[in-house]
Amino acid sequence: MPSSELARAARPEATAATPDPASDVLALLTIDLAAIVANWRSMRAVCGVETAAVVKADGYGVGAVPVAHALAAAGCTRFFVATPDEGIALRAALAAPEIAILDGLPAGAESLYREHRLTPVLNRPDEVRSWLAFSERRGEPLPAMLHVDTGMHRLGLAPKEFVALAEEPEFRAYRWGCLMSHLACSDEPAHDLNARQAGAFAALRQHLPQVPGSLAASSGIFLGPDYQHDLTRPGAGLFGVNPQPGRANPLEGTVHLQARILAVRDVDPDRTVGYGAAHTVTLPSKIATIAVGYADGYPRAAGSRGTMRLGGFAVPVVGRISMDLVTLDVSAVPPDIARVGAWVEVIGPGRSIDEVAADCGTIAYEILTSLGARYRRRYIGAL
């Protein structure tokens, strides 16, 4: 069964997102927790191994705590965040599952990690030695993971550093939670670096064969068994970002962003719209203004190139994106639809997060993590 069908089969049909009718709600962000859980289950079914969840950057912008609660209720027992502060905040809301910190172990933070039951992902030899020494002083093998660099050249133990450490009895005997690496080009299946990294990781695992391995994030899961090992770490895929660009998305959309029309006005030919007179009207037009802007995470780069949806019609963005406002050409939309108070779909079933990112010349990760604080947020599909 295709993974998209698995996702739909994993939960009841989602309730359609009906905007809050309150008149003071100018922009509404709906997050479908059931769809997030369905995506996690779908990727777990694809790989057939333990599947964690990466909820860094406040759950890729949609809320780490509600997302983690929903995933923990569905059976997820390992979560990854980037920083200690993110881990502490998540631990305050989540008692049981393991929370691992991808950015490593800051100097002197050992006691803080133990207090909040955080698992460091150790990236440097000095971090490894500090954690081993701290565990020895405590008289217990405190949880930790190892990160080895196989080609990203960003974080992680260099292969020579890892091999040298693996010759030390104390290091070999420690109960490491996993040995992980990170793929640089997993969203490009044909890129030769994928195979090189997979081979390097498999070779390095031979030095600690008893330790579970973890190489694949969302896109890596779909590269096949050579990349899946014992633990996968999906992040953006949980939120519906396409893990296989250029192919049909096997995952469900999870965010629905809508904004109200604040005004509709007739604009004559040769008149301009917005800052800098960046758009000139060539035909008699109707221009609608909605309550979203770059302060809300809708990128300025979308000016005169973005597209939104209104009542089933595609409506182009015209002119520059303002801090609080976007202008749309709604000339082709019937006036009973293109009216003050109507809801425009910025992101949703008719305009995916990947399509919005393409409008802006960026990636869906950036759109998600930039979602603004001014939106009225609501969560549906909680377990």
Image (cartoon, rainbow, N blue to C red):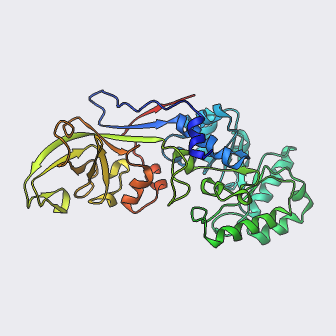
Comparing 367 with 247, the one in front is 247
Kindly identify the residue that appears in the image at 21 percent across and 46 percent down: 289
Q: Which quarter of the rendering shows the N terminus? A: top right
Residue 208, position in %: x, y? 86, 59
Residue 101, position in %: x, y? 66, 50
Kindly identify the residue that appears in the image at 60 percent across and 50 percent down: 83
Q: Is residue 111 above or below residue 305?
A: above
Residue 259, position in %: x, y? 30, 40
333 left or right of 80? left
The quarter of the picture where residue 299 lies is bottom left
Q: Which quarter of the rendering shows the C terminus? A: top right
Q: Is residue 21 visible?
A: yes
357 left or right of 121? left
Q: Is residue 150 visible?
A: no
The quarter of the picture where residue 142 lies is top right
Q: Is residue 217 above or below residue 8?
A: below
Comparing 311 with 156, the one in front is 311
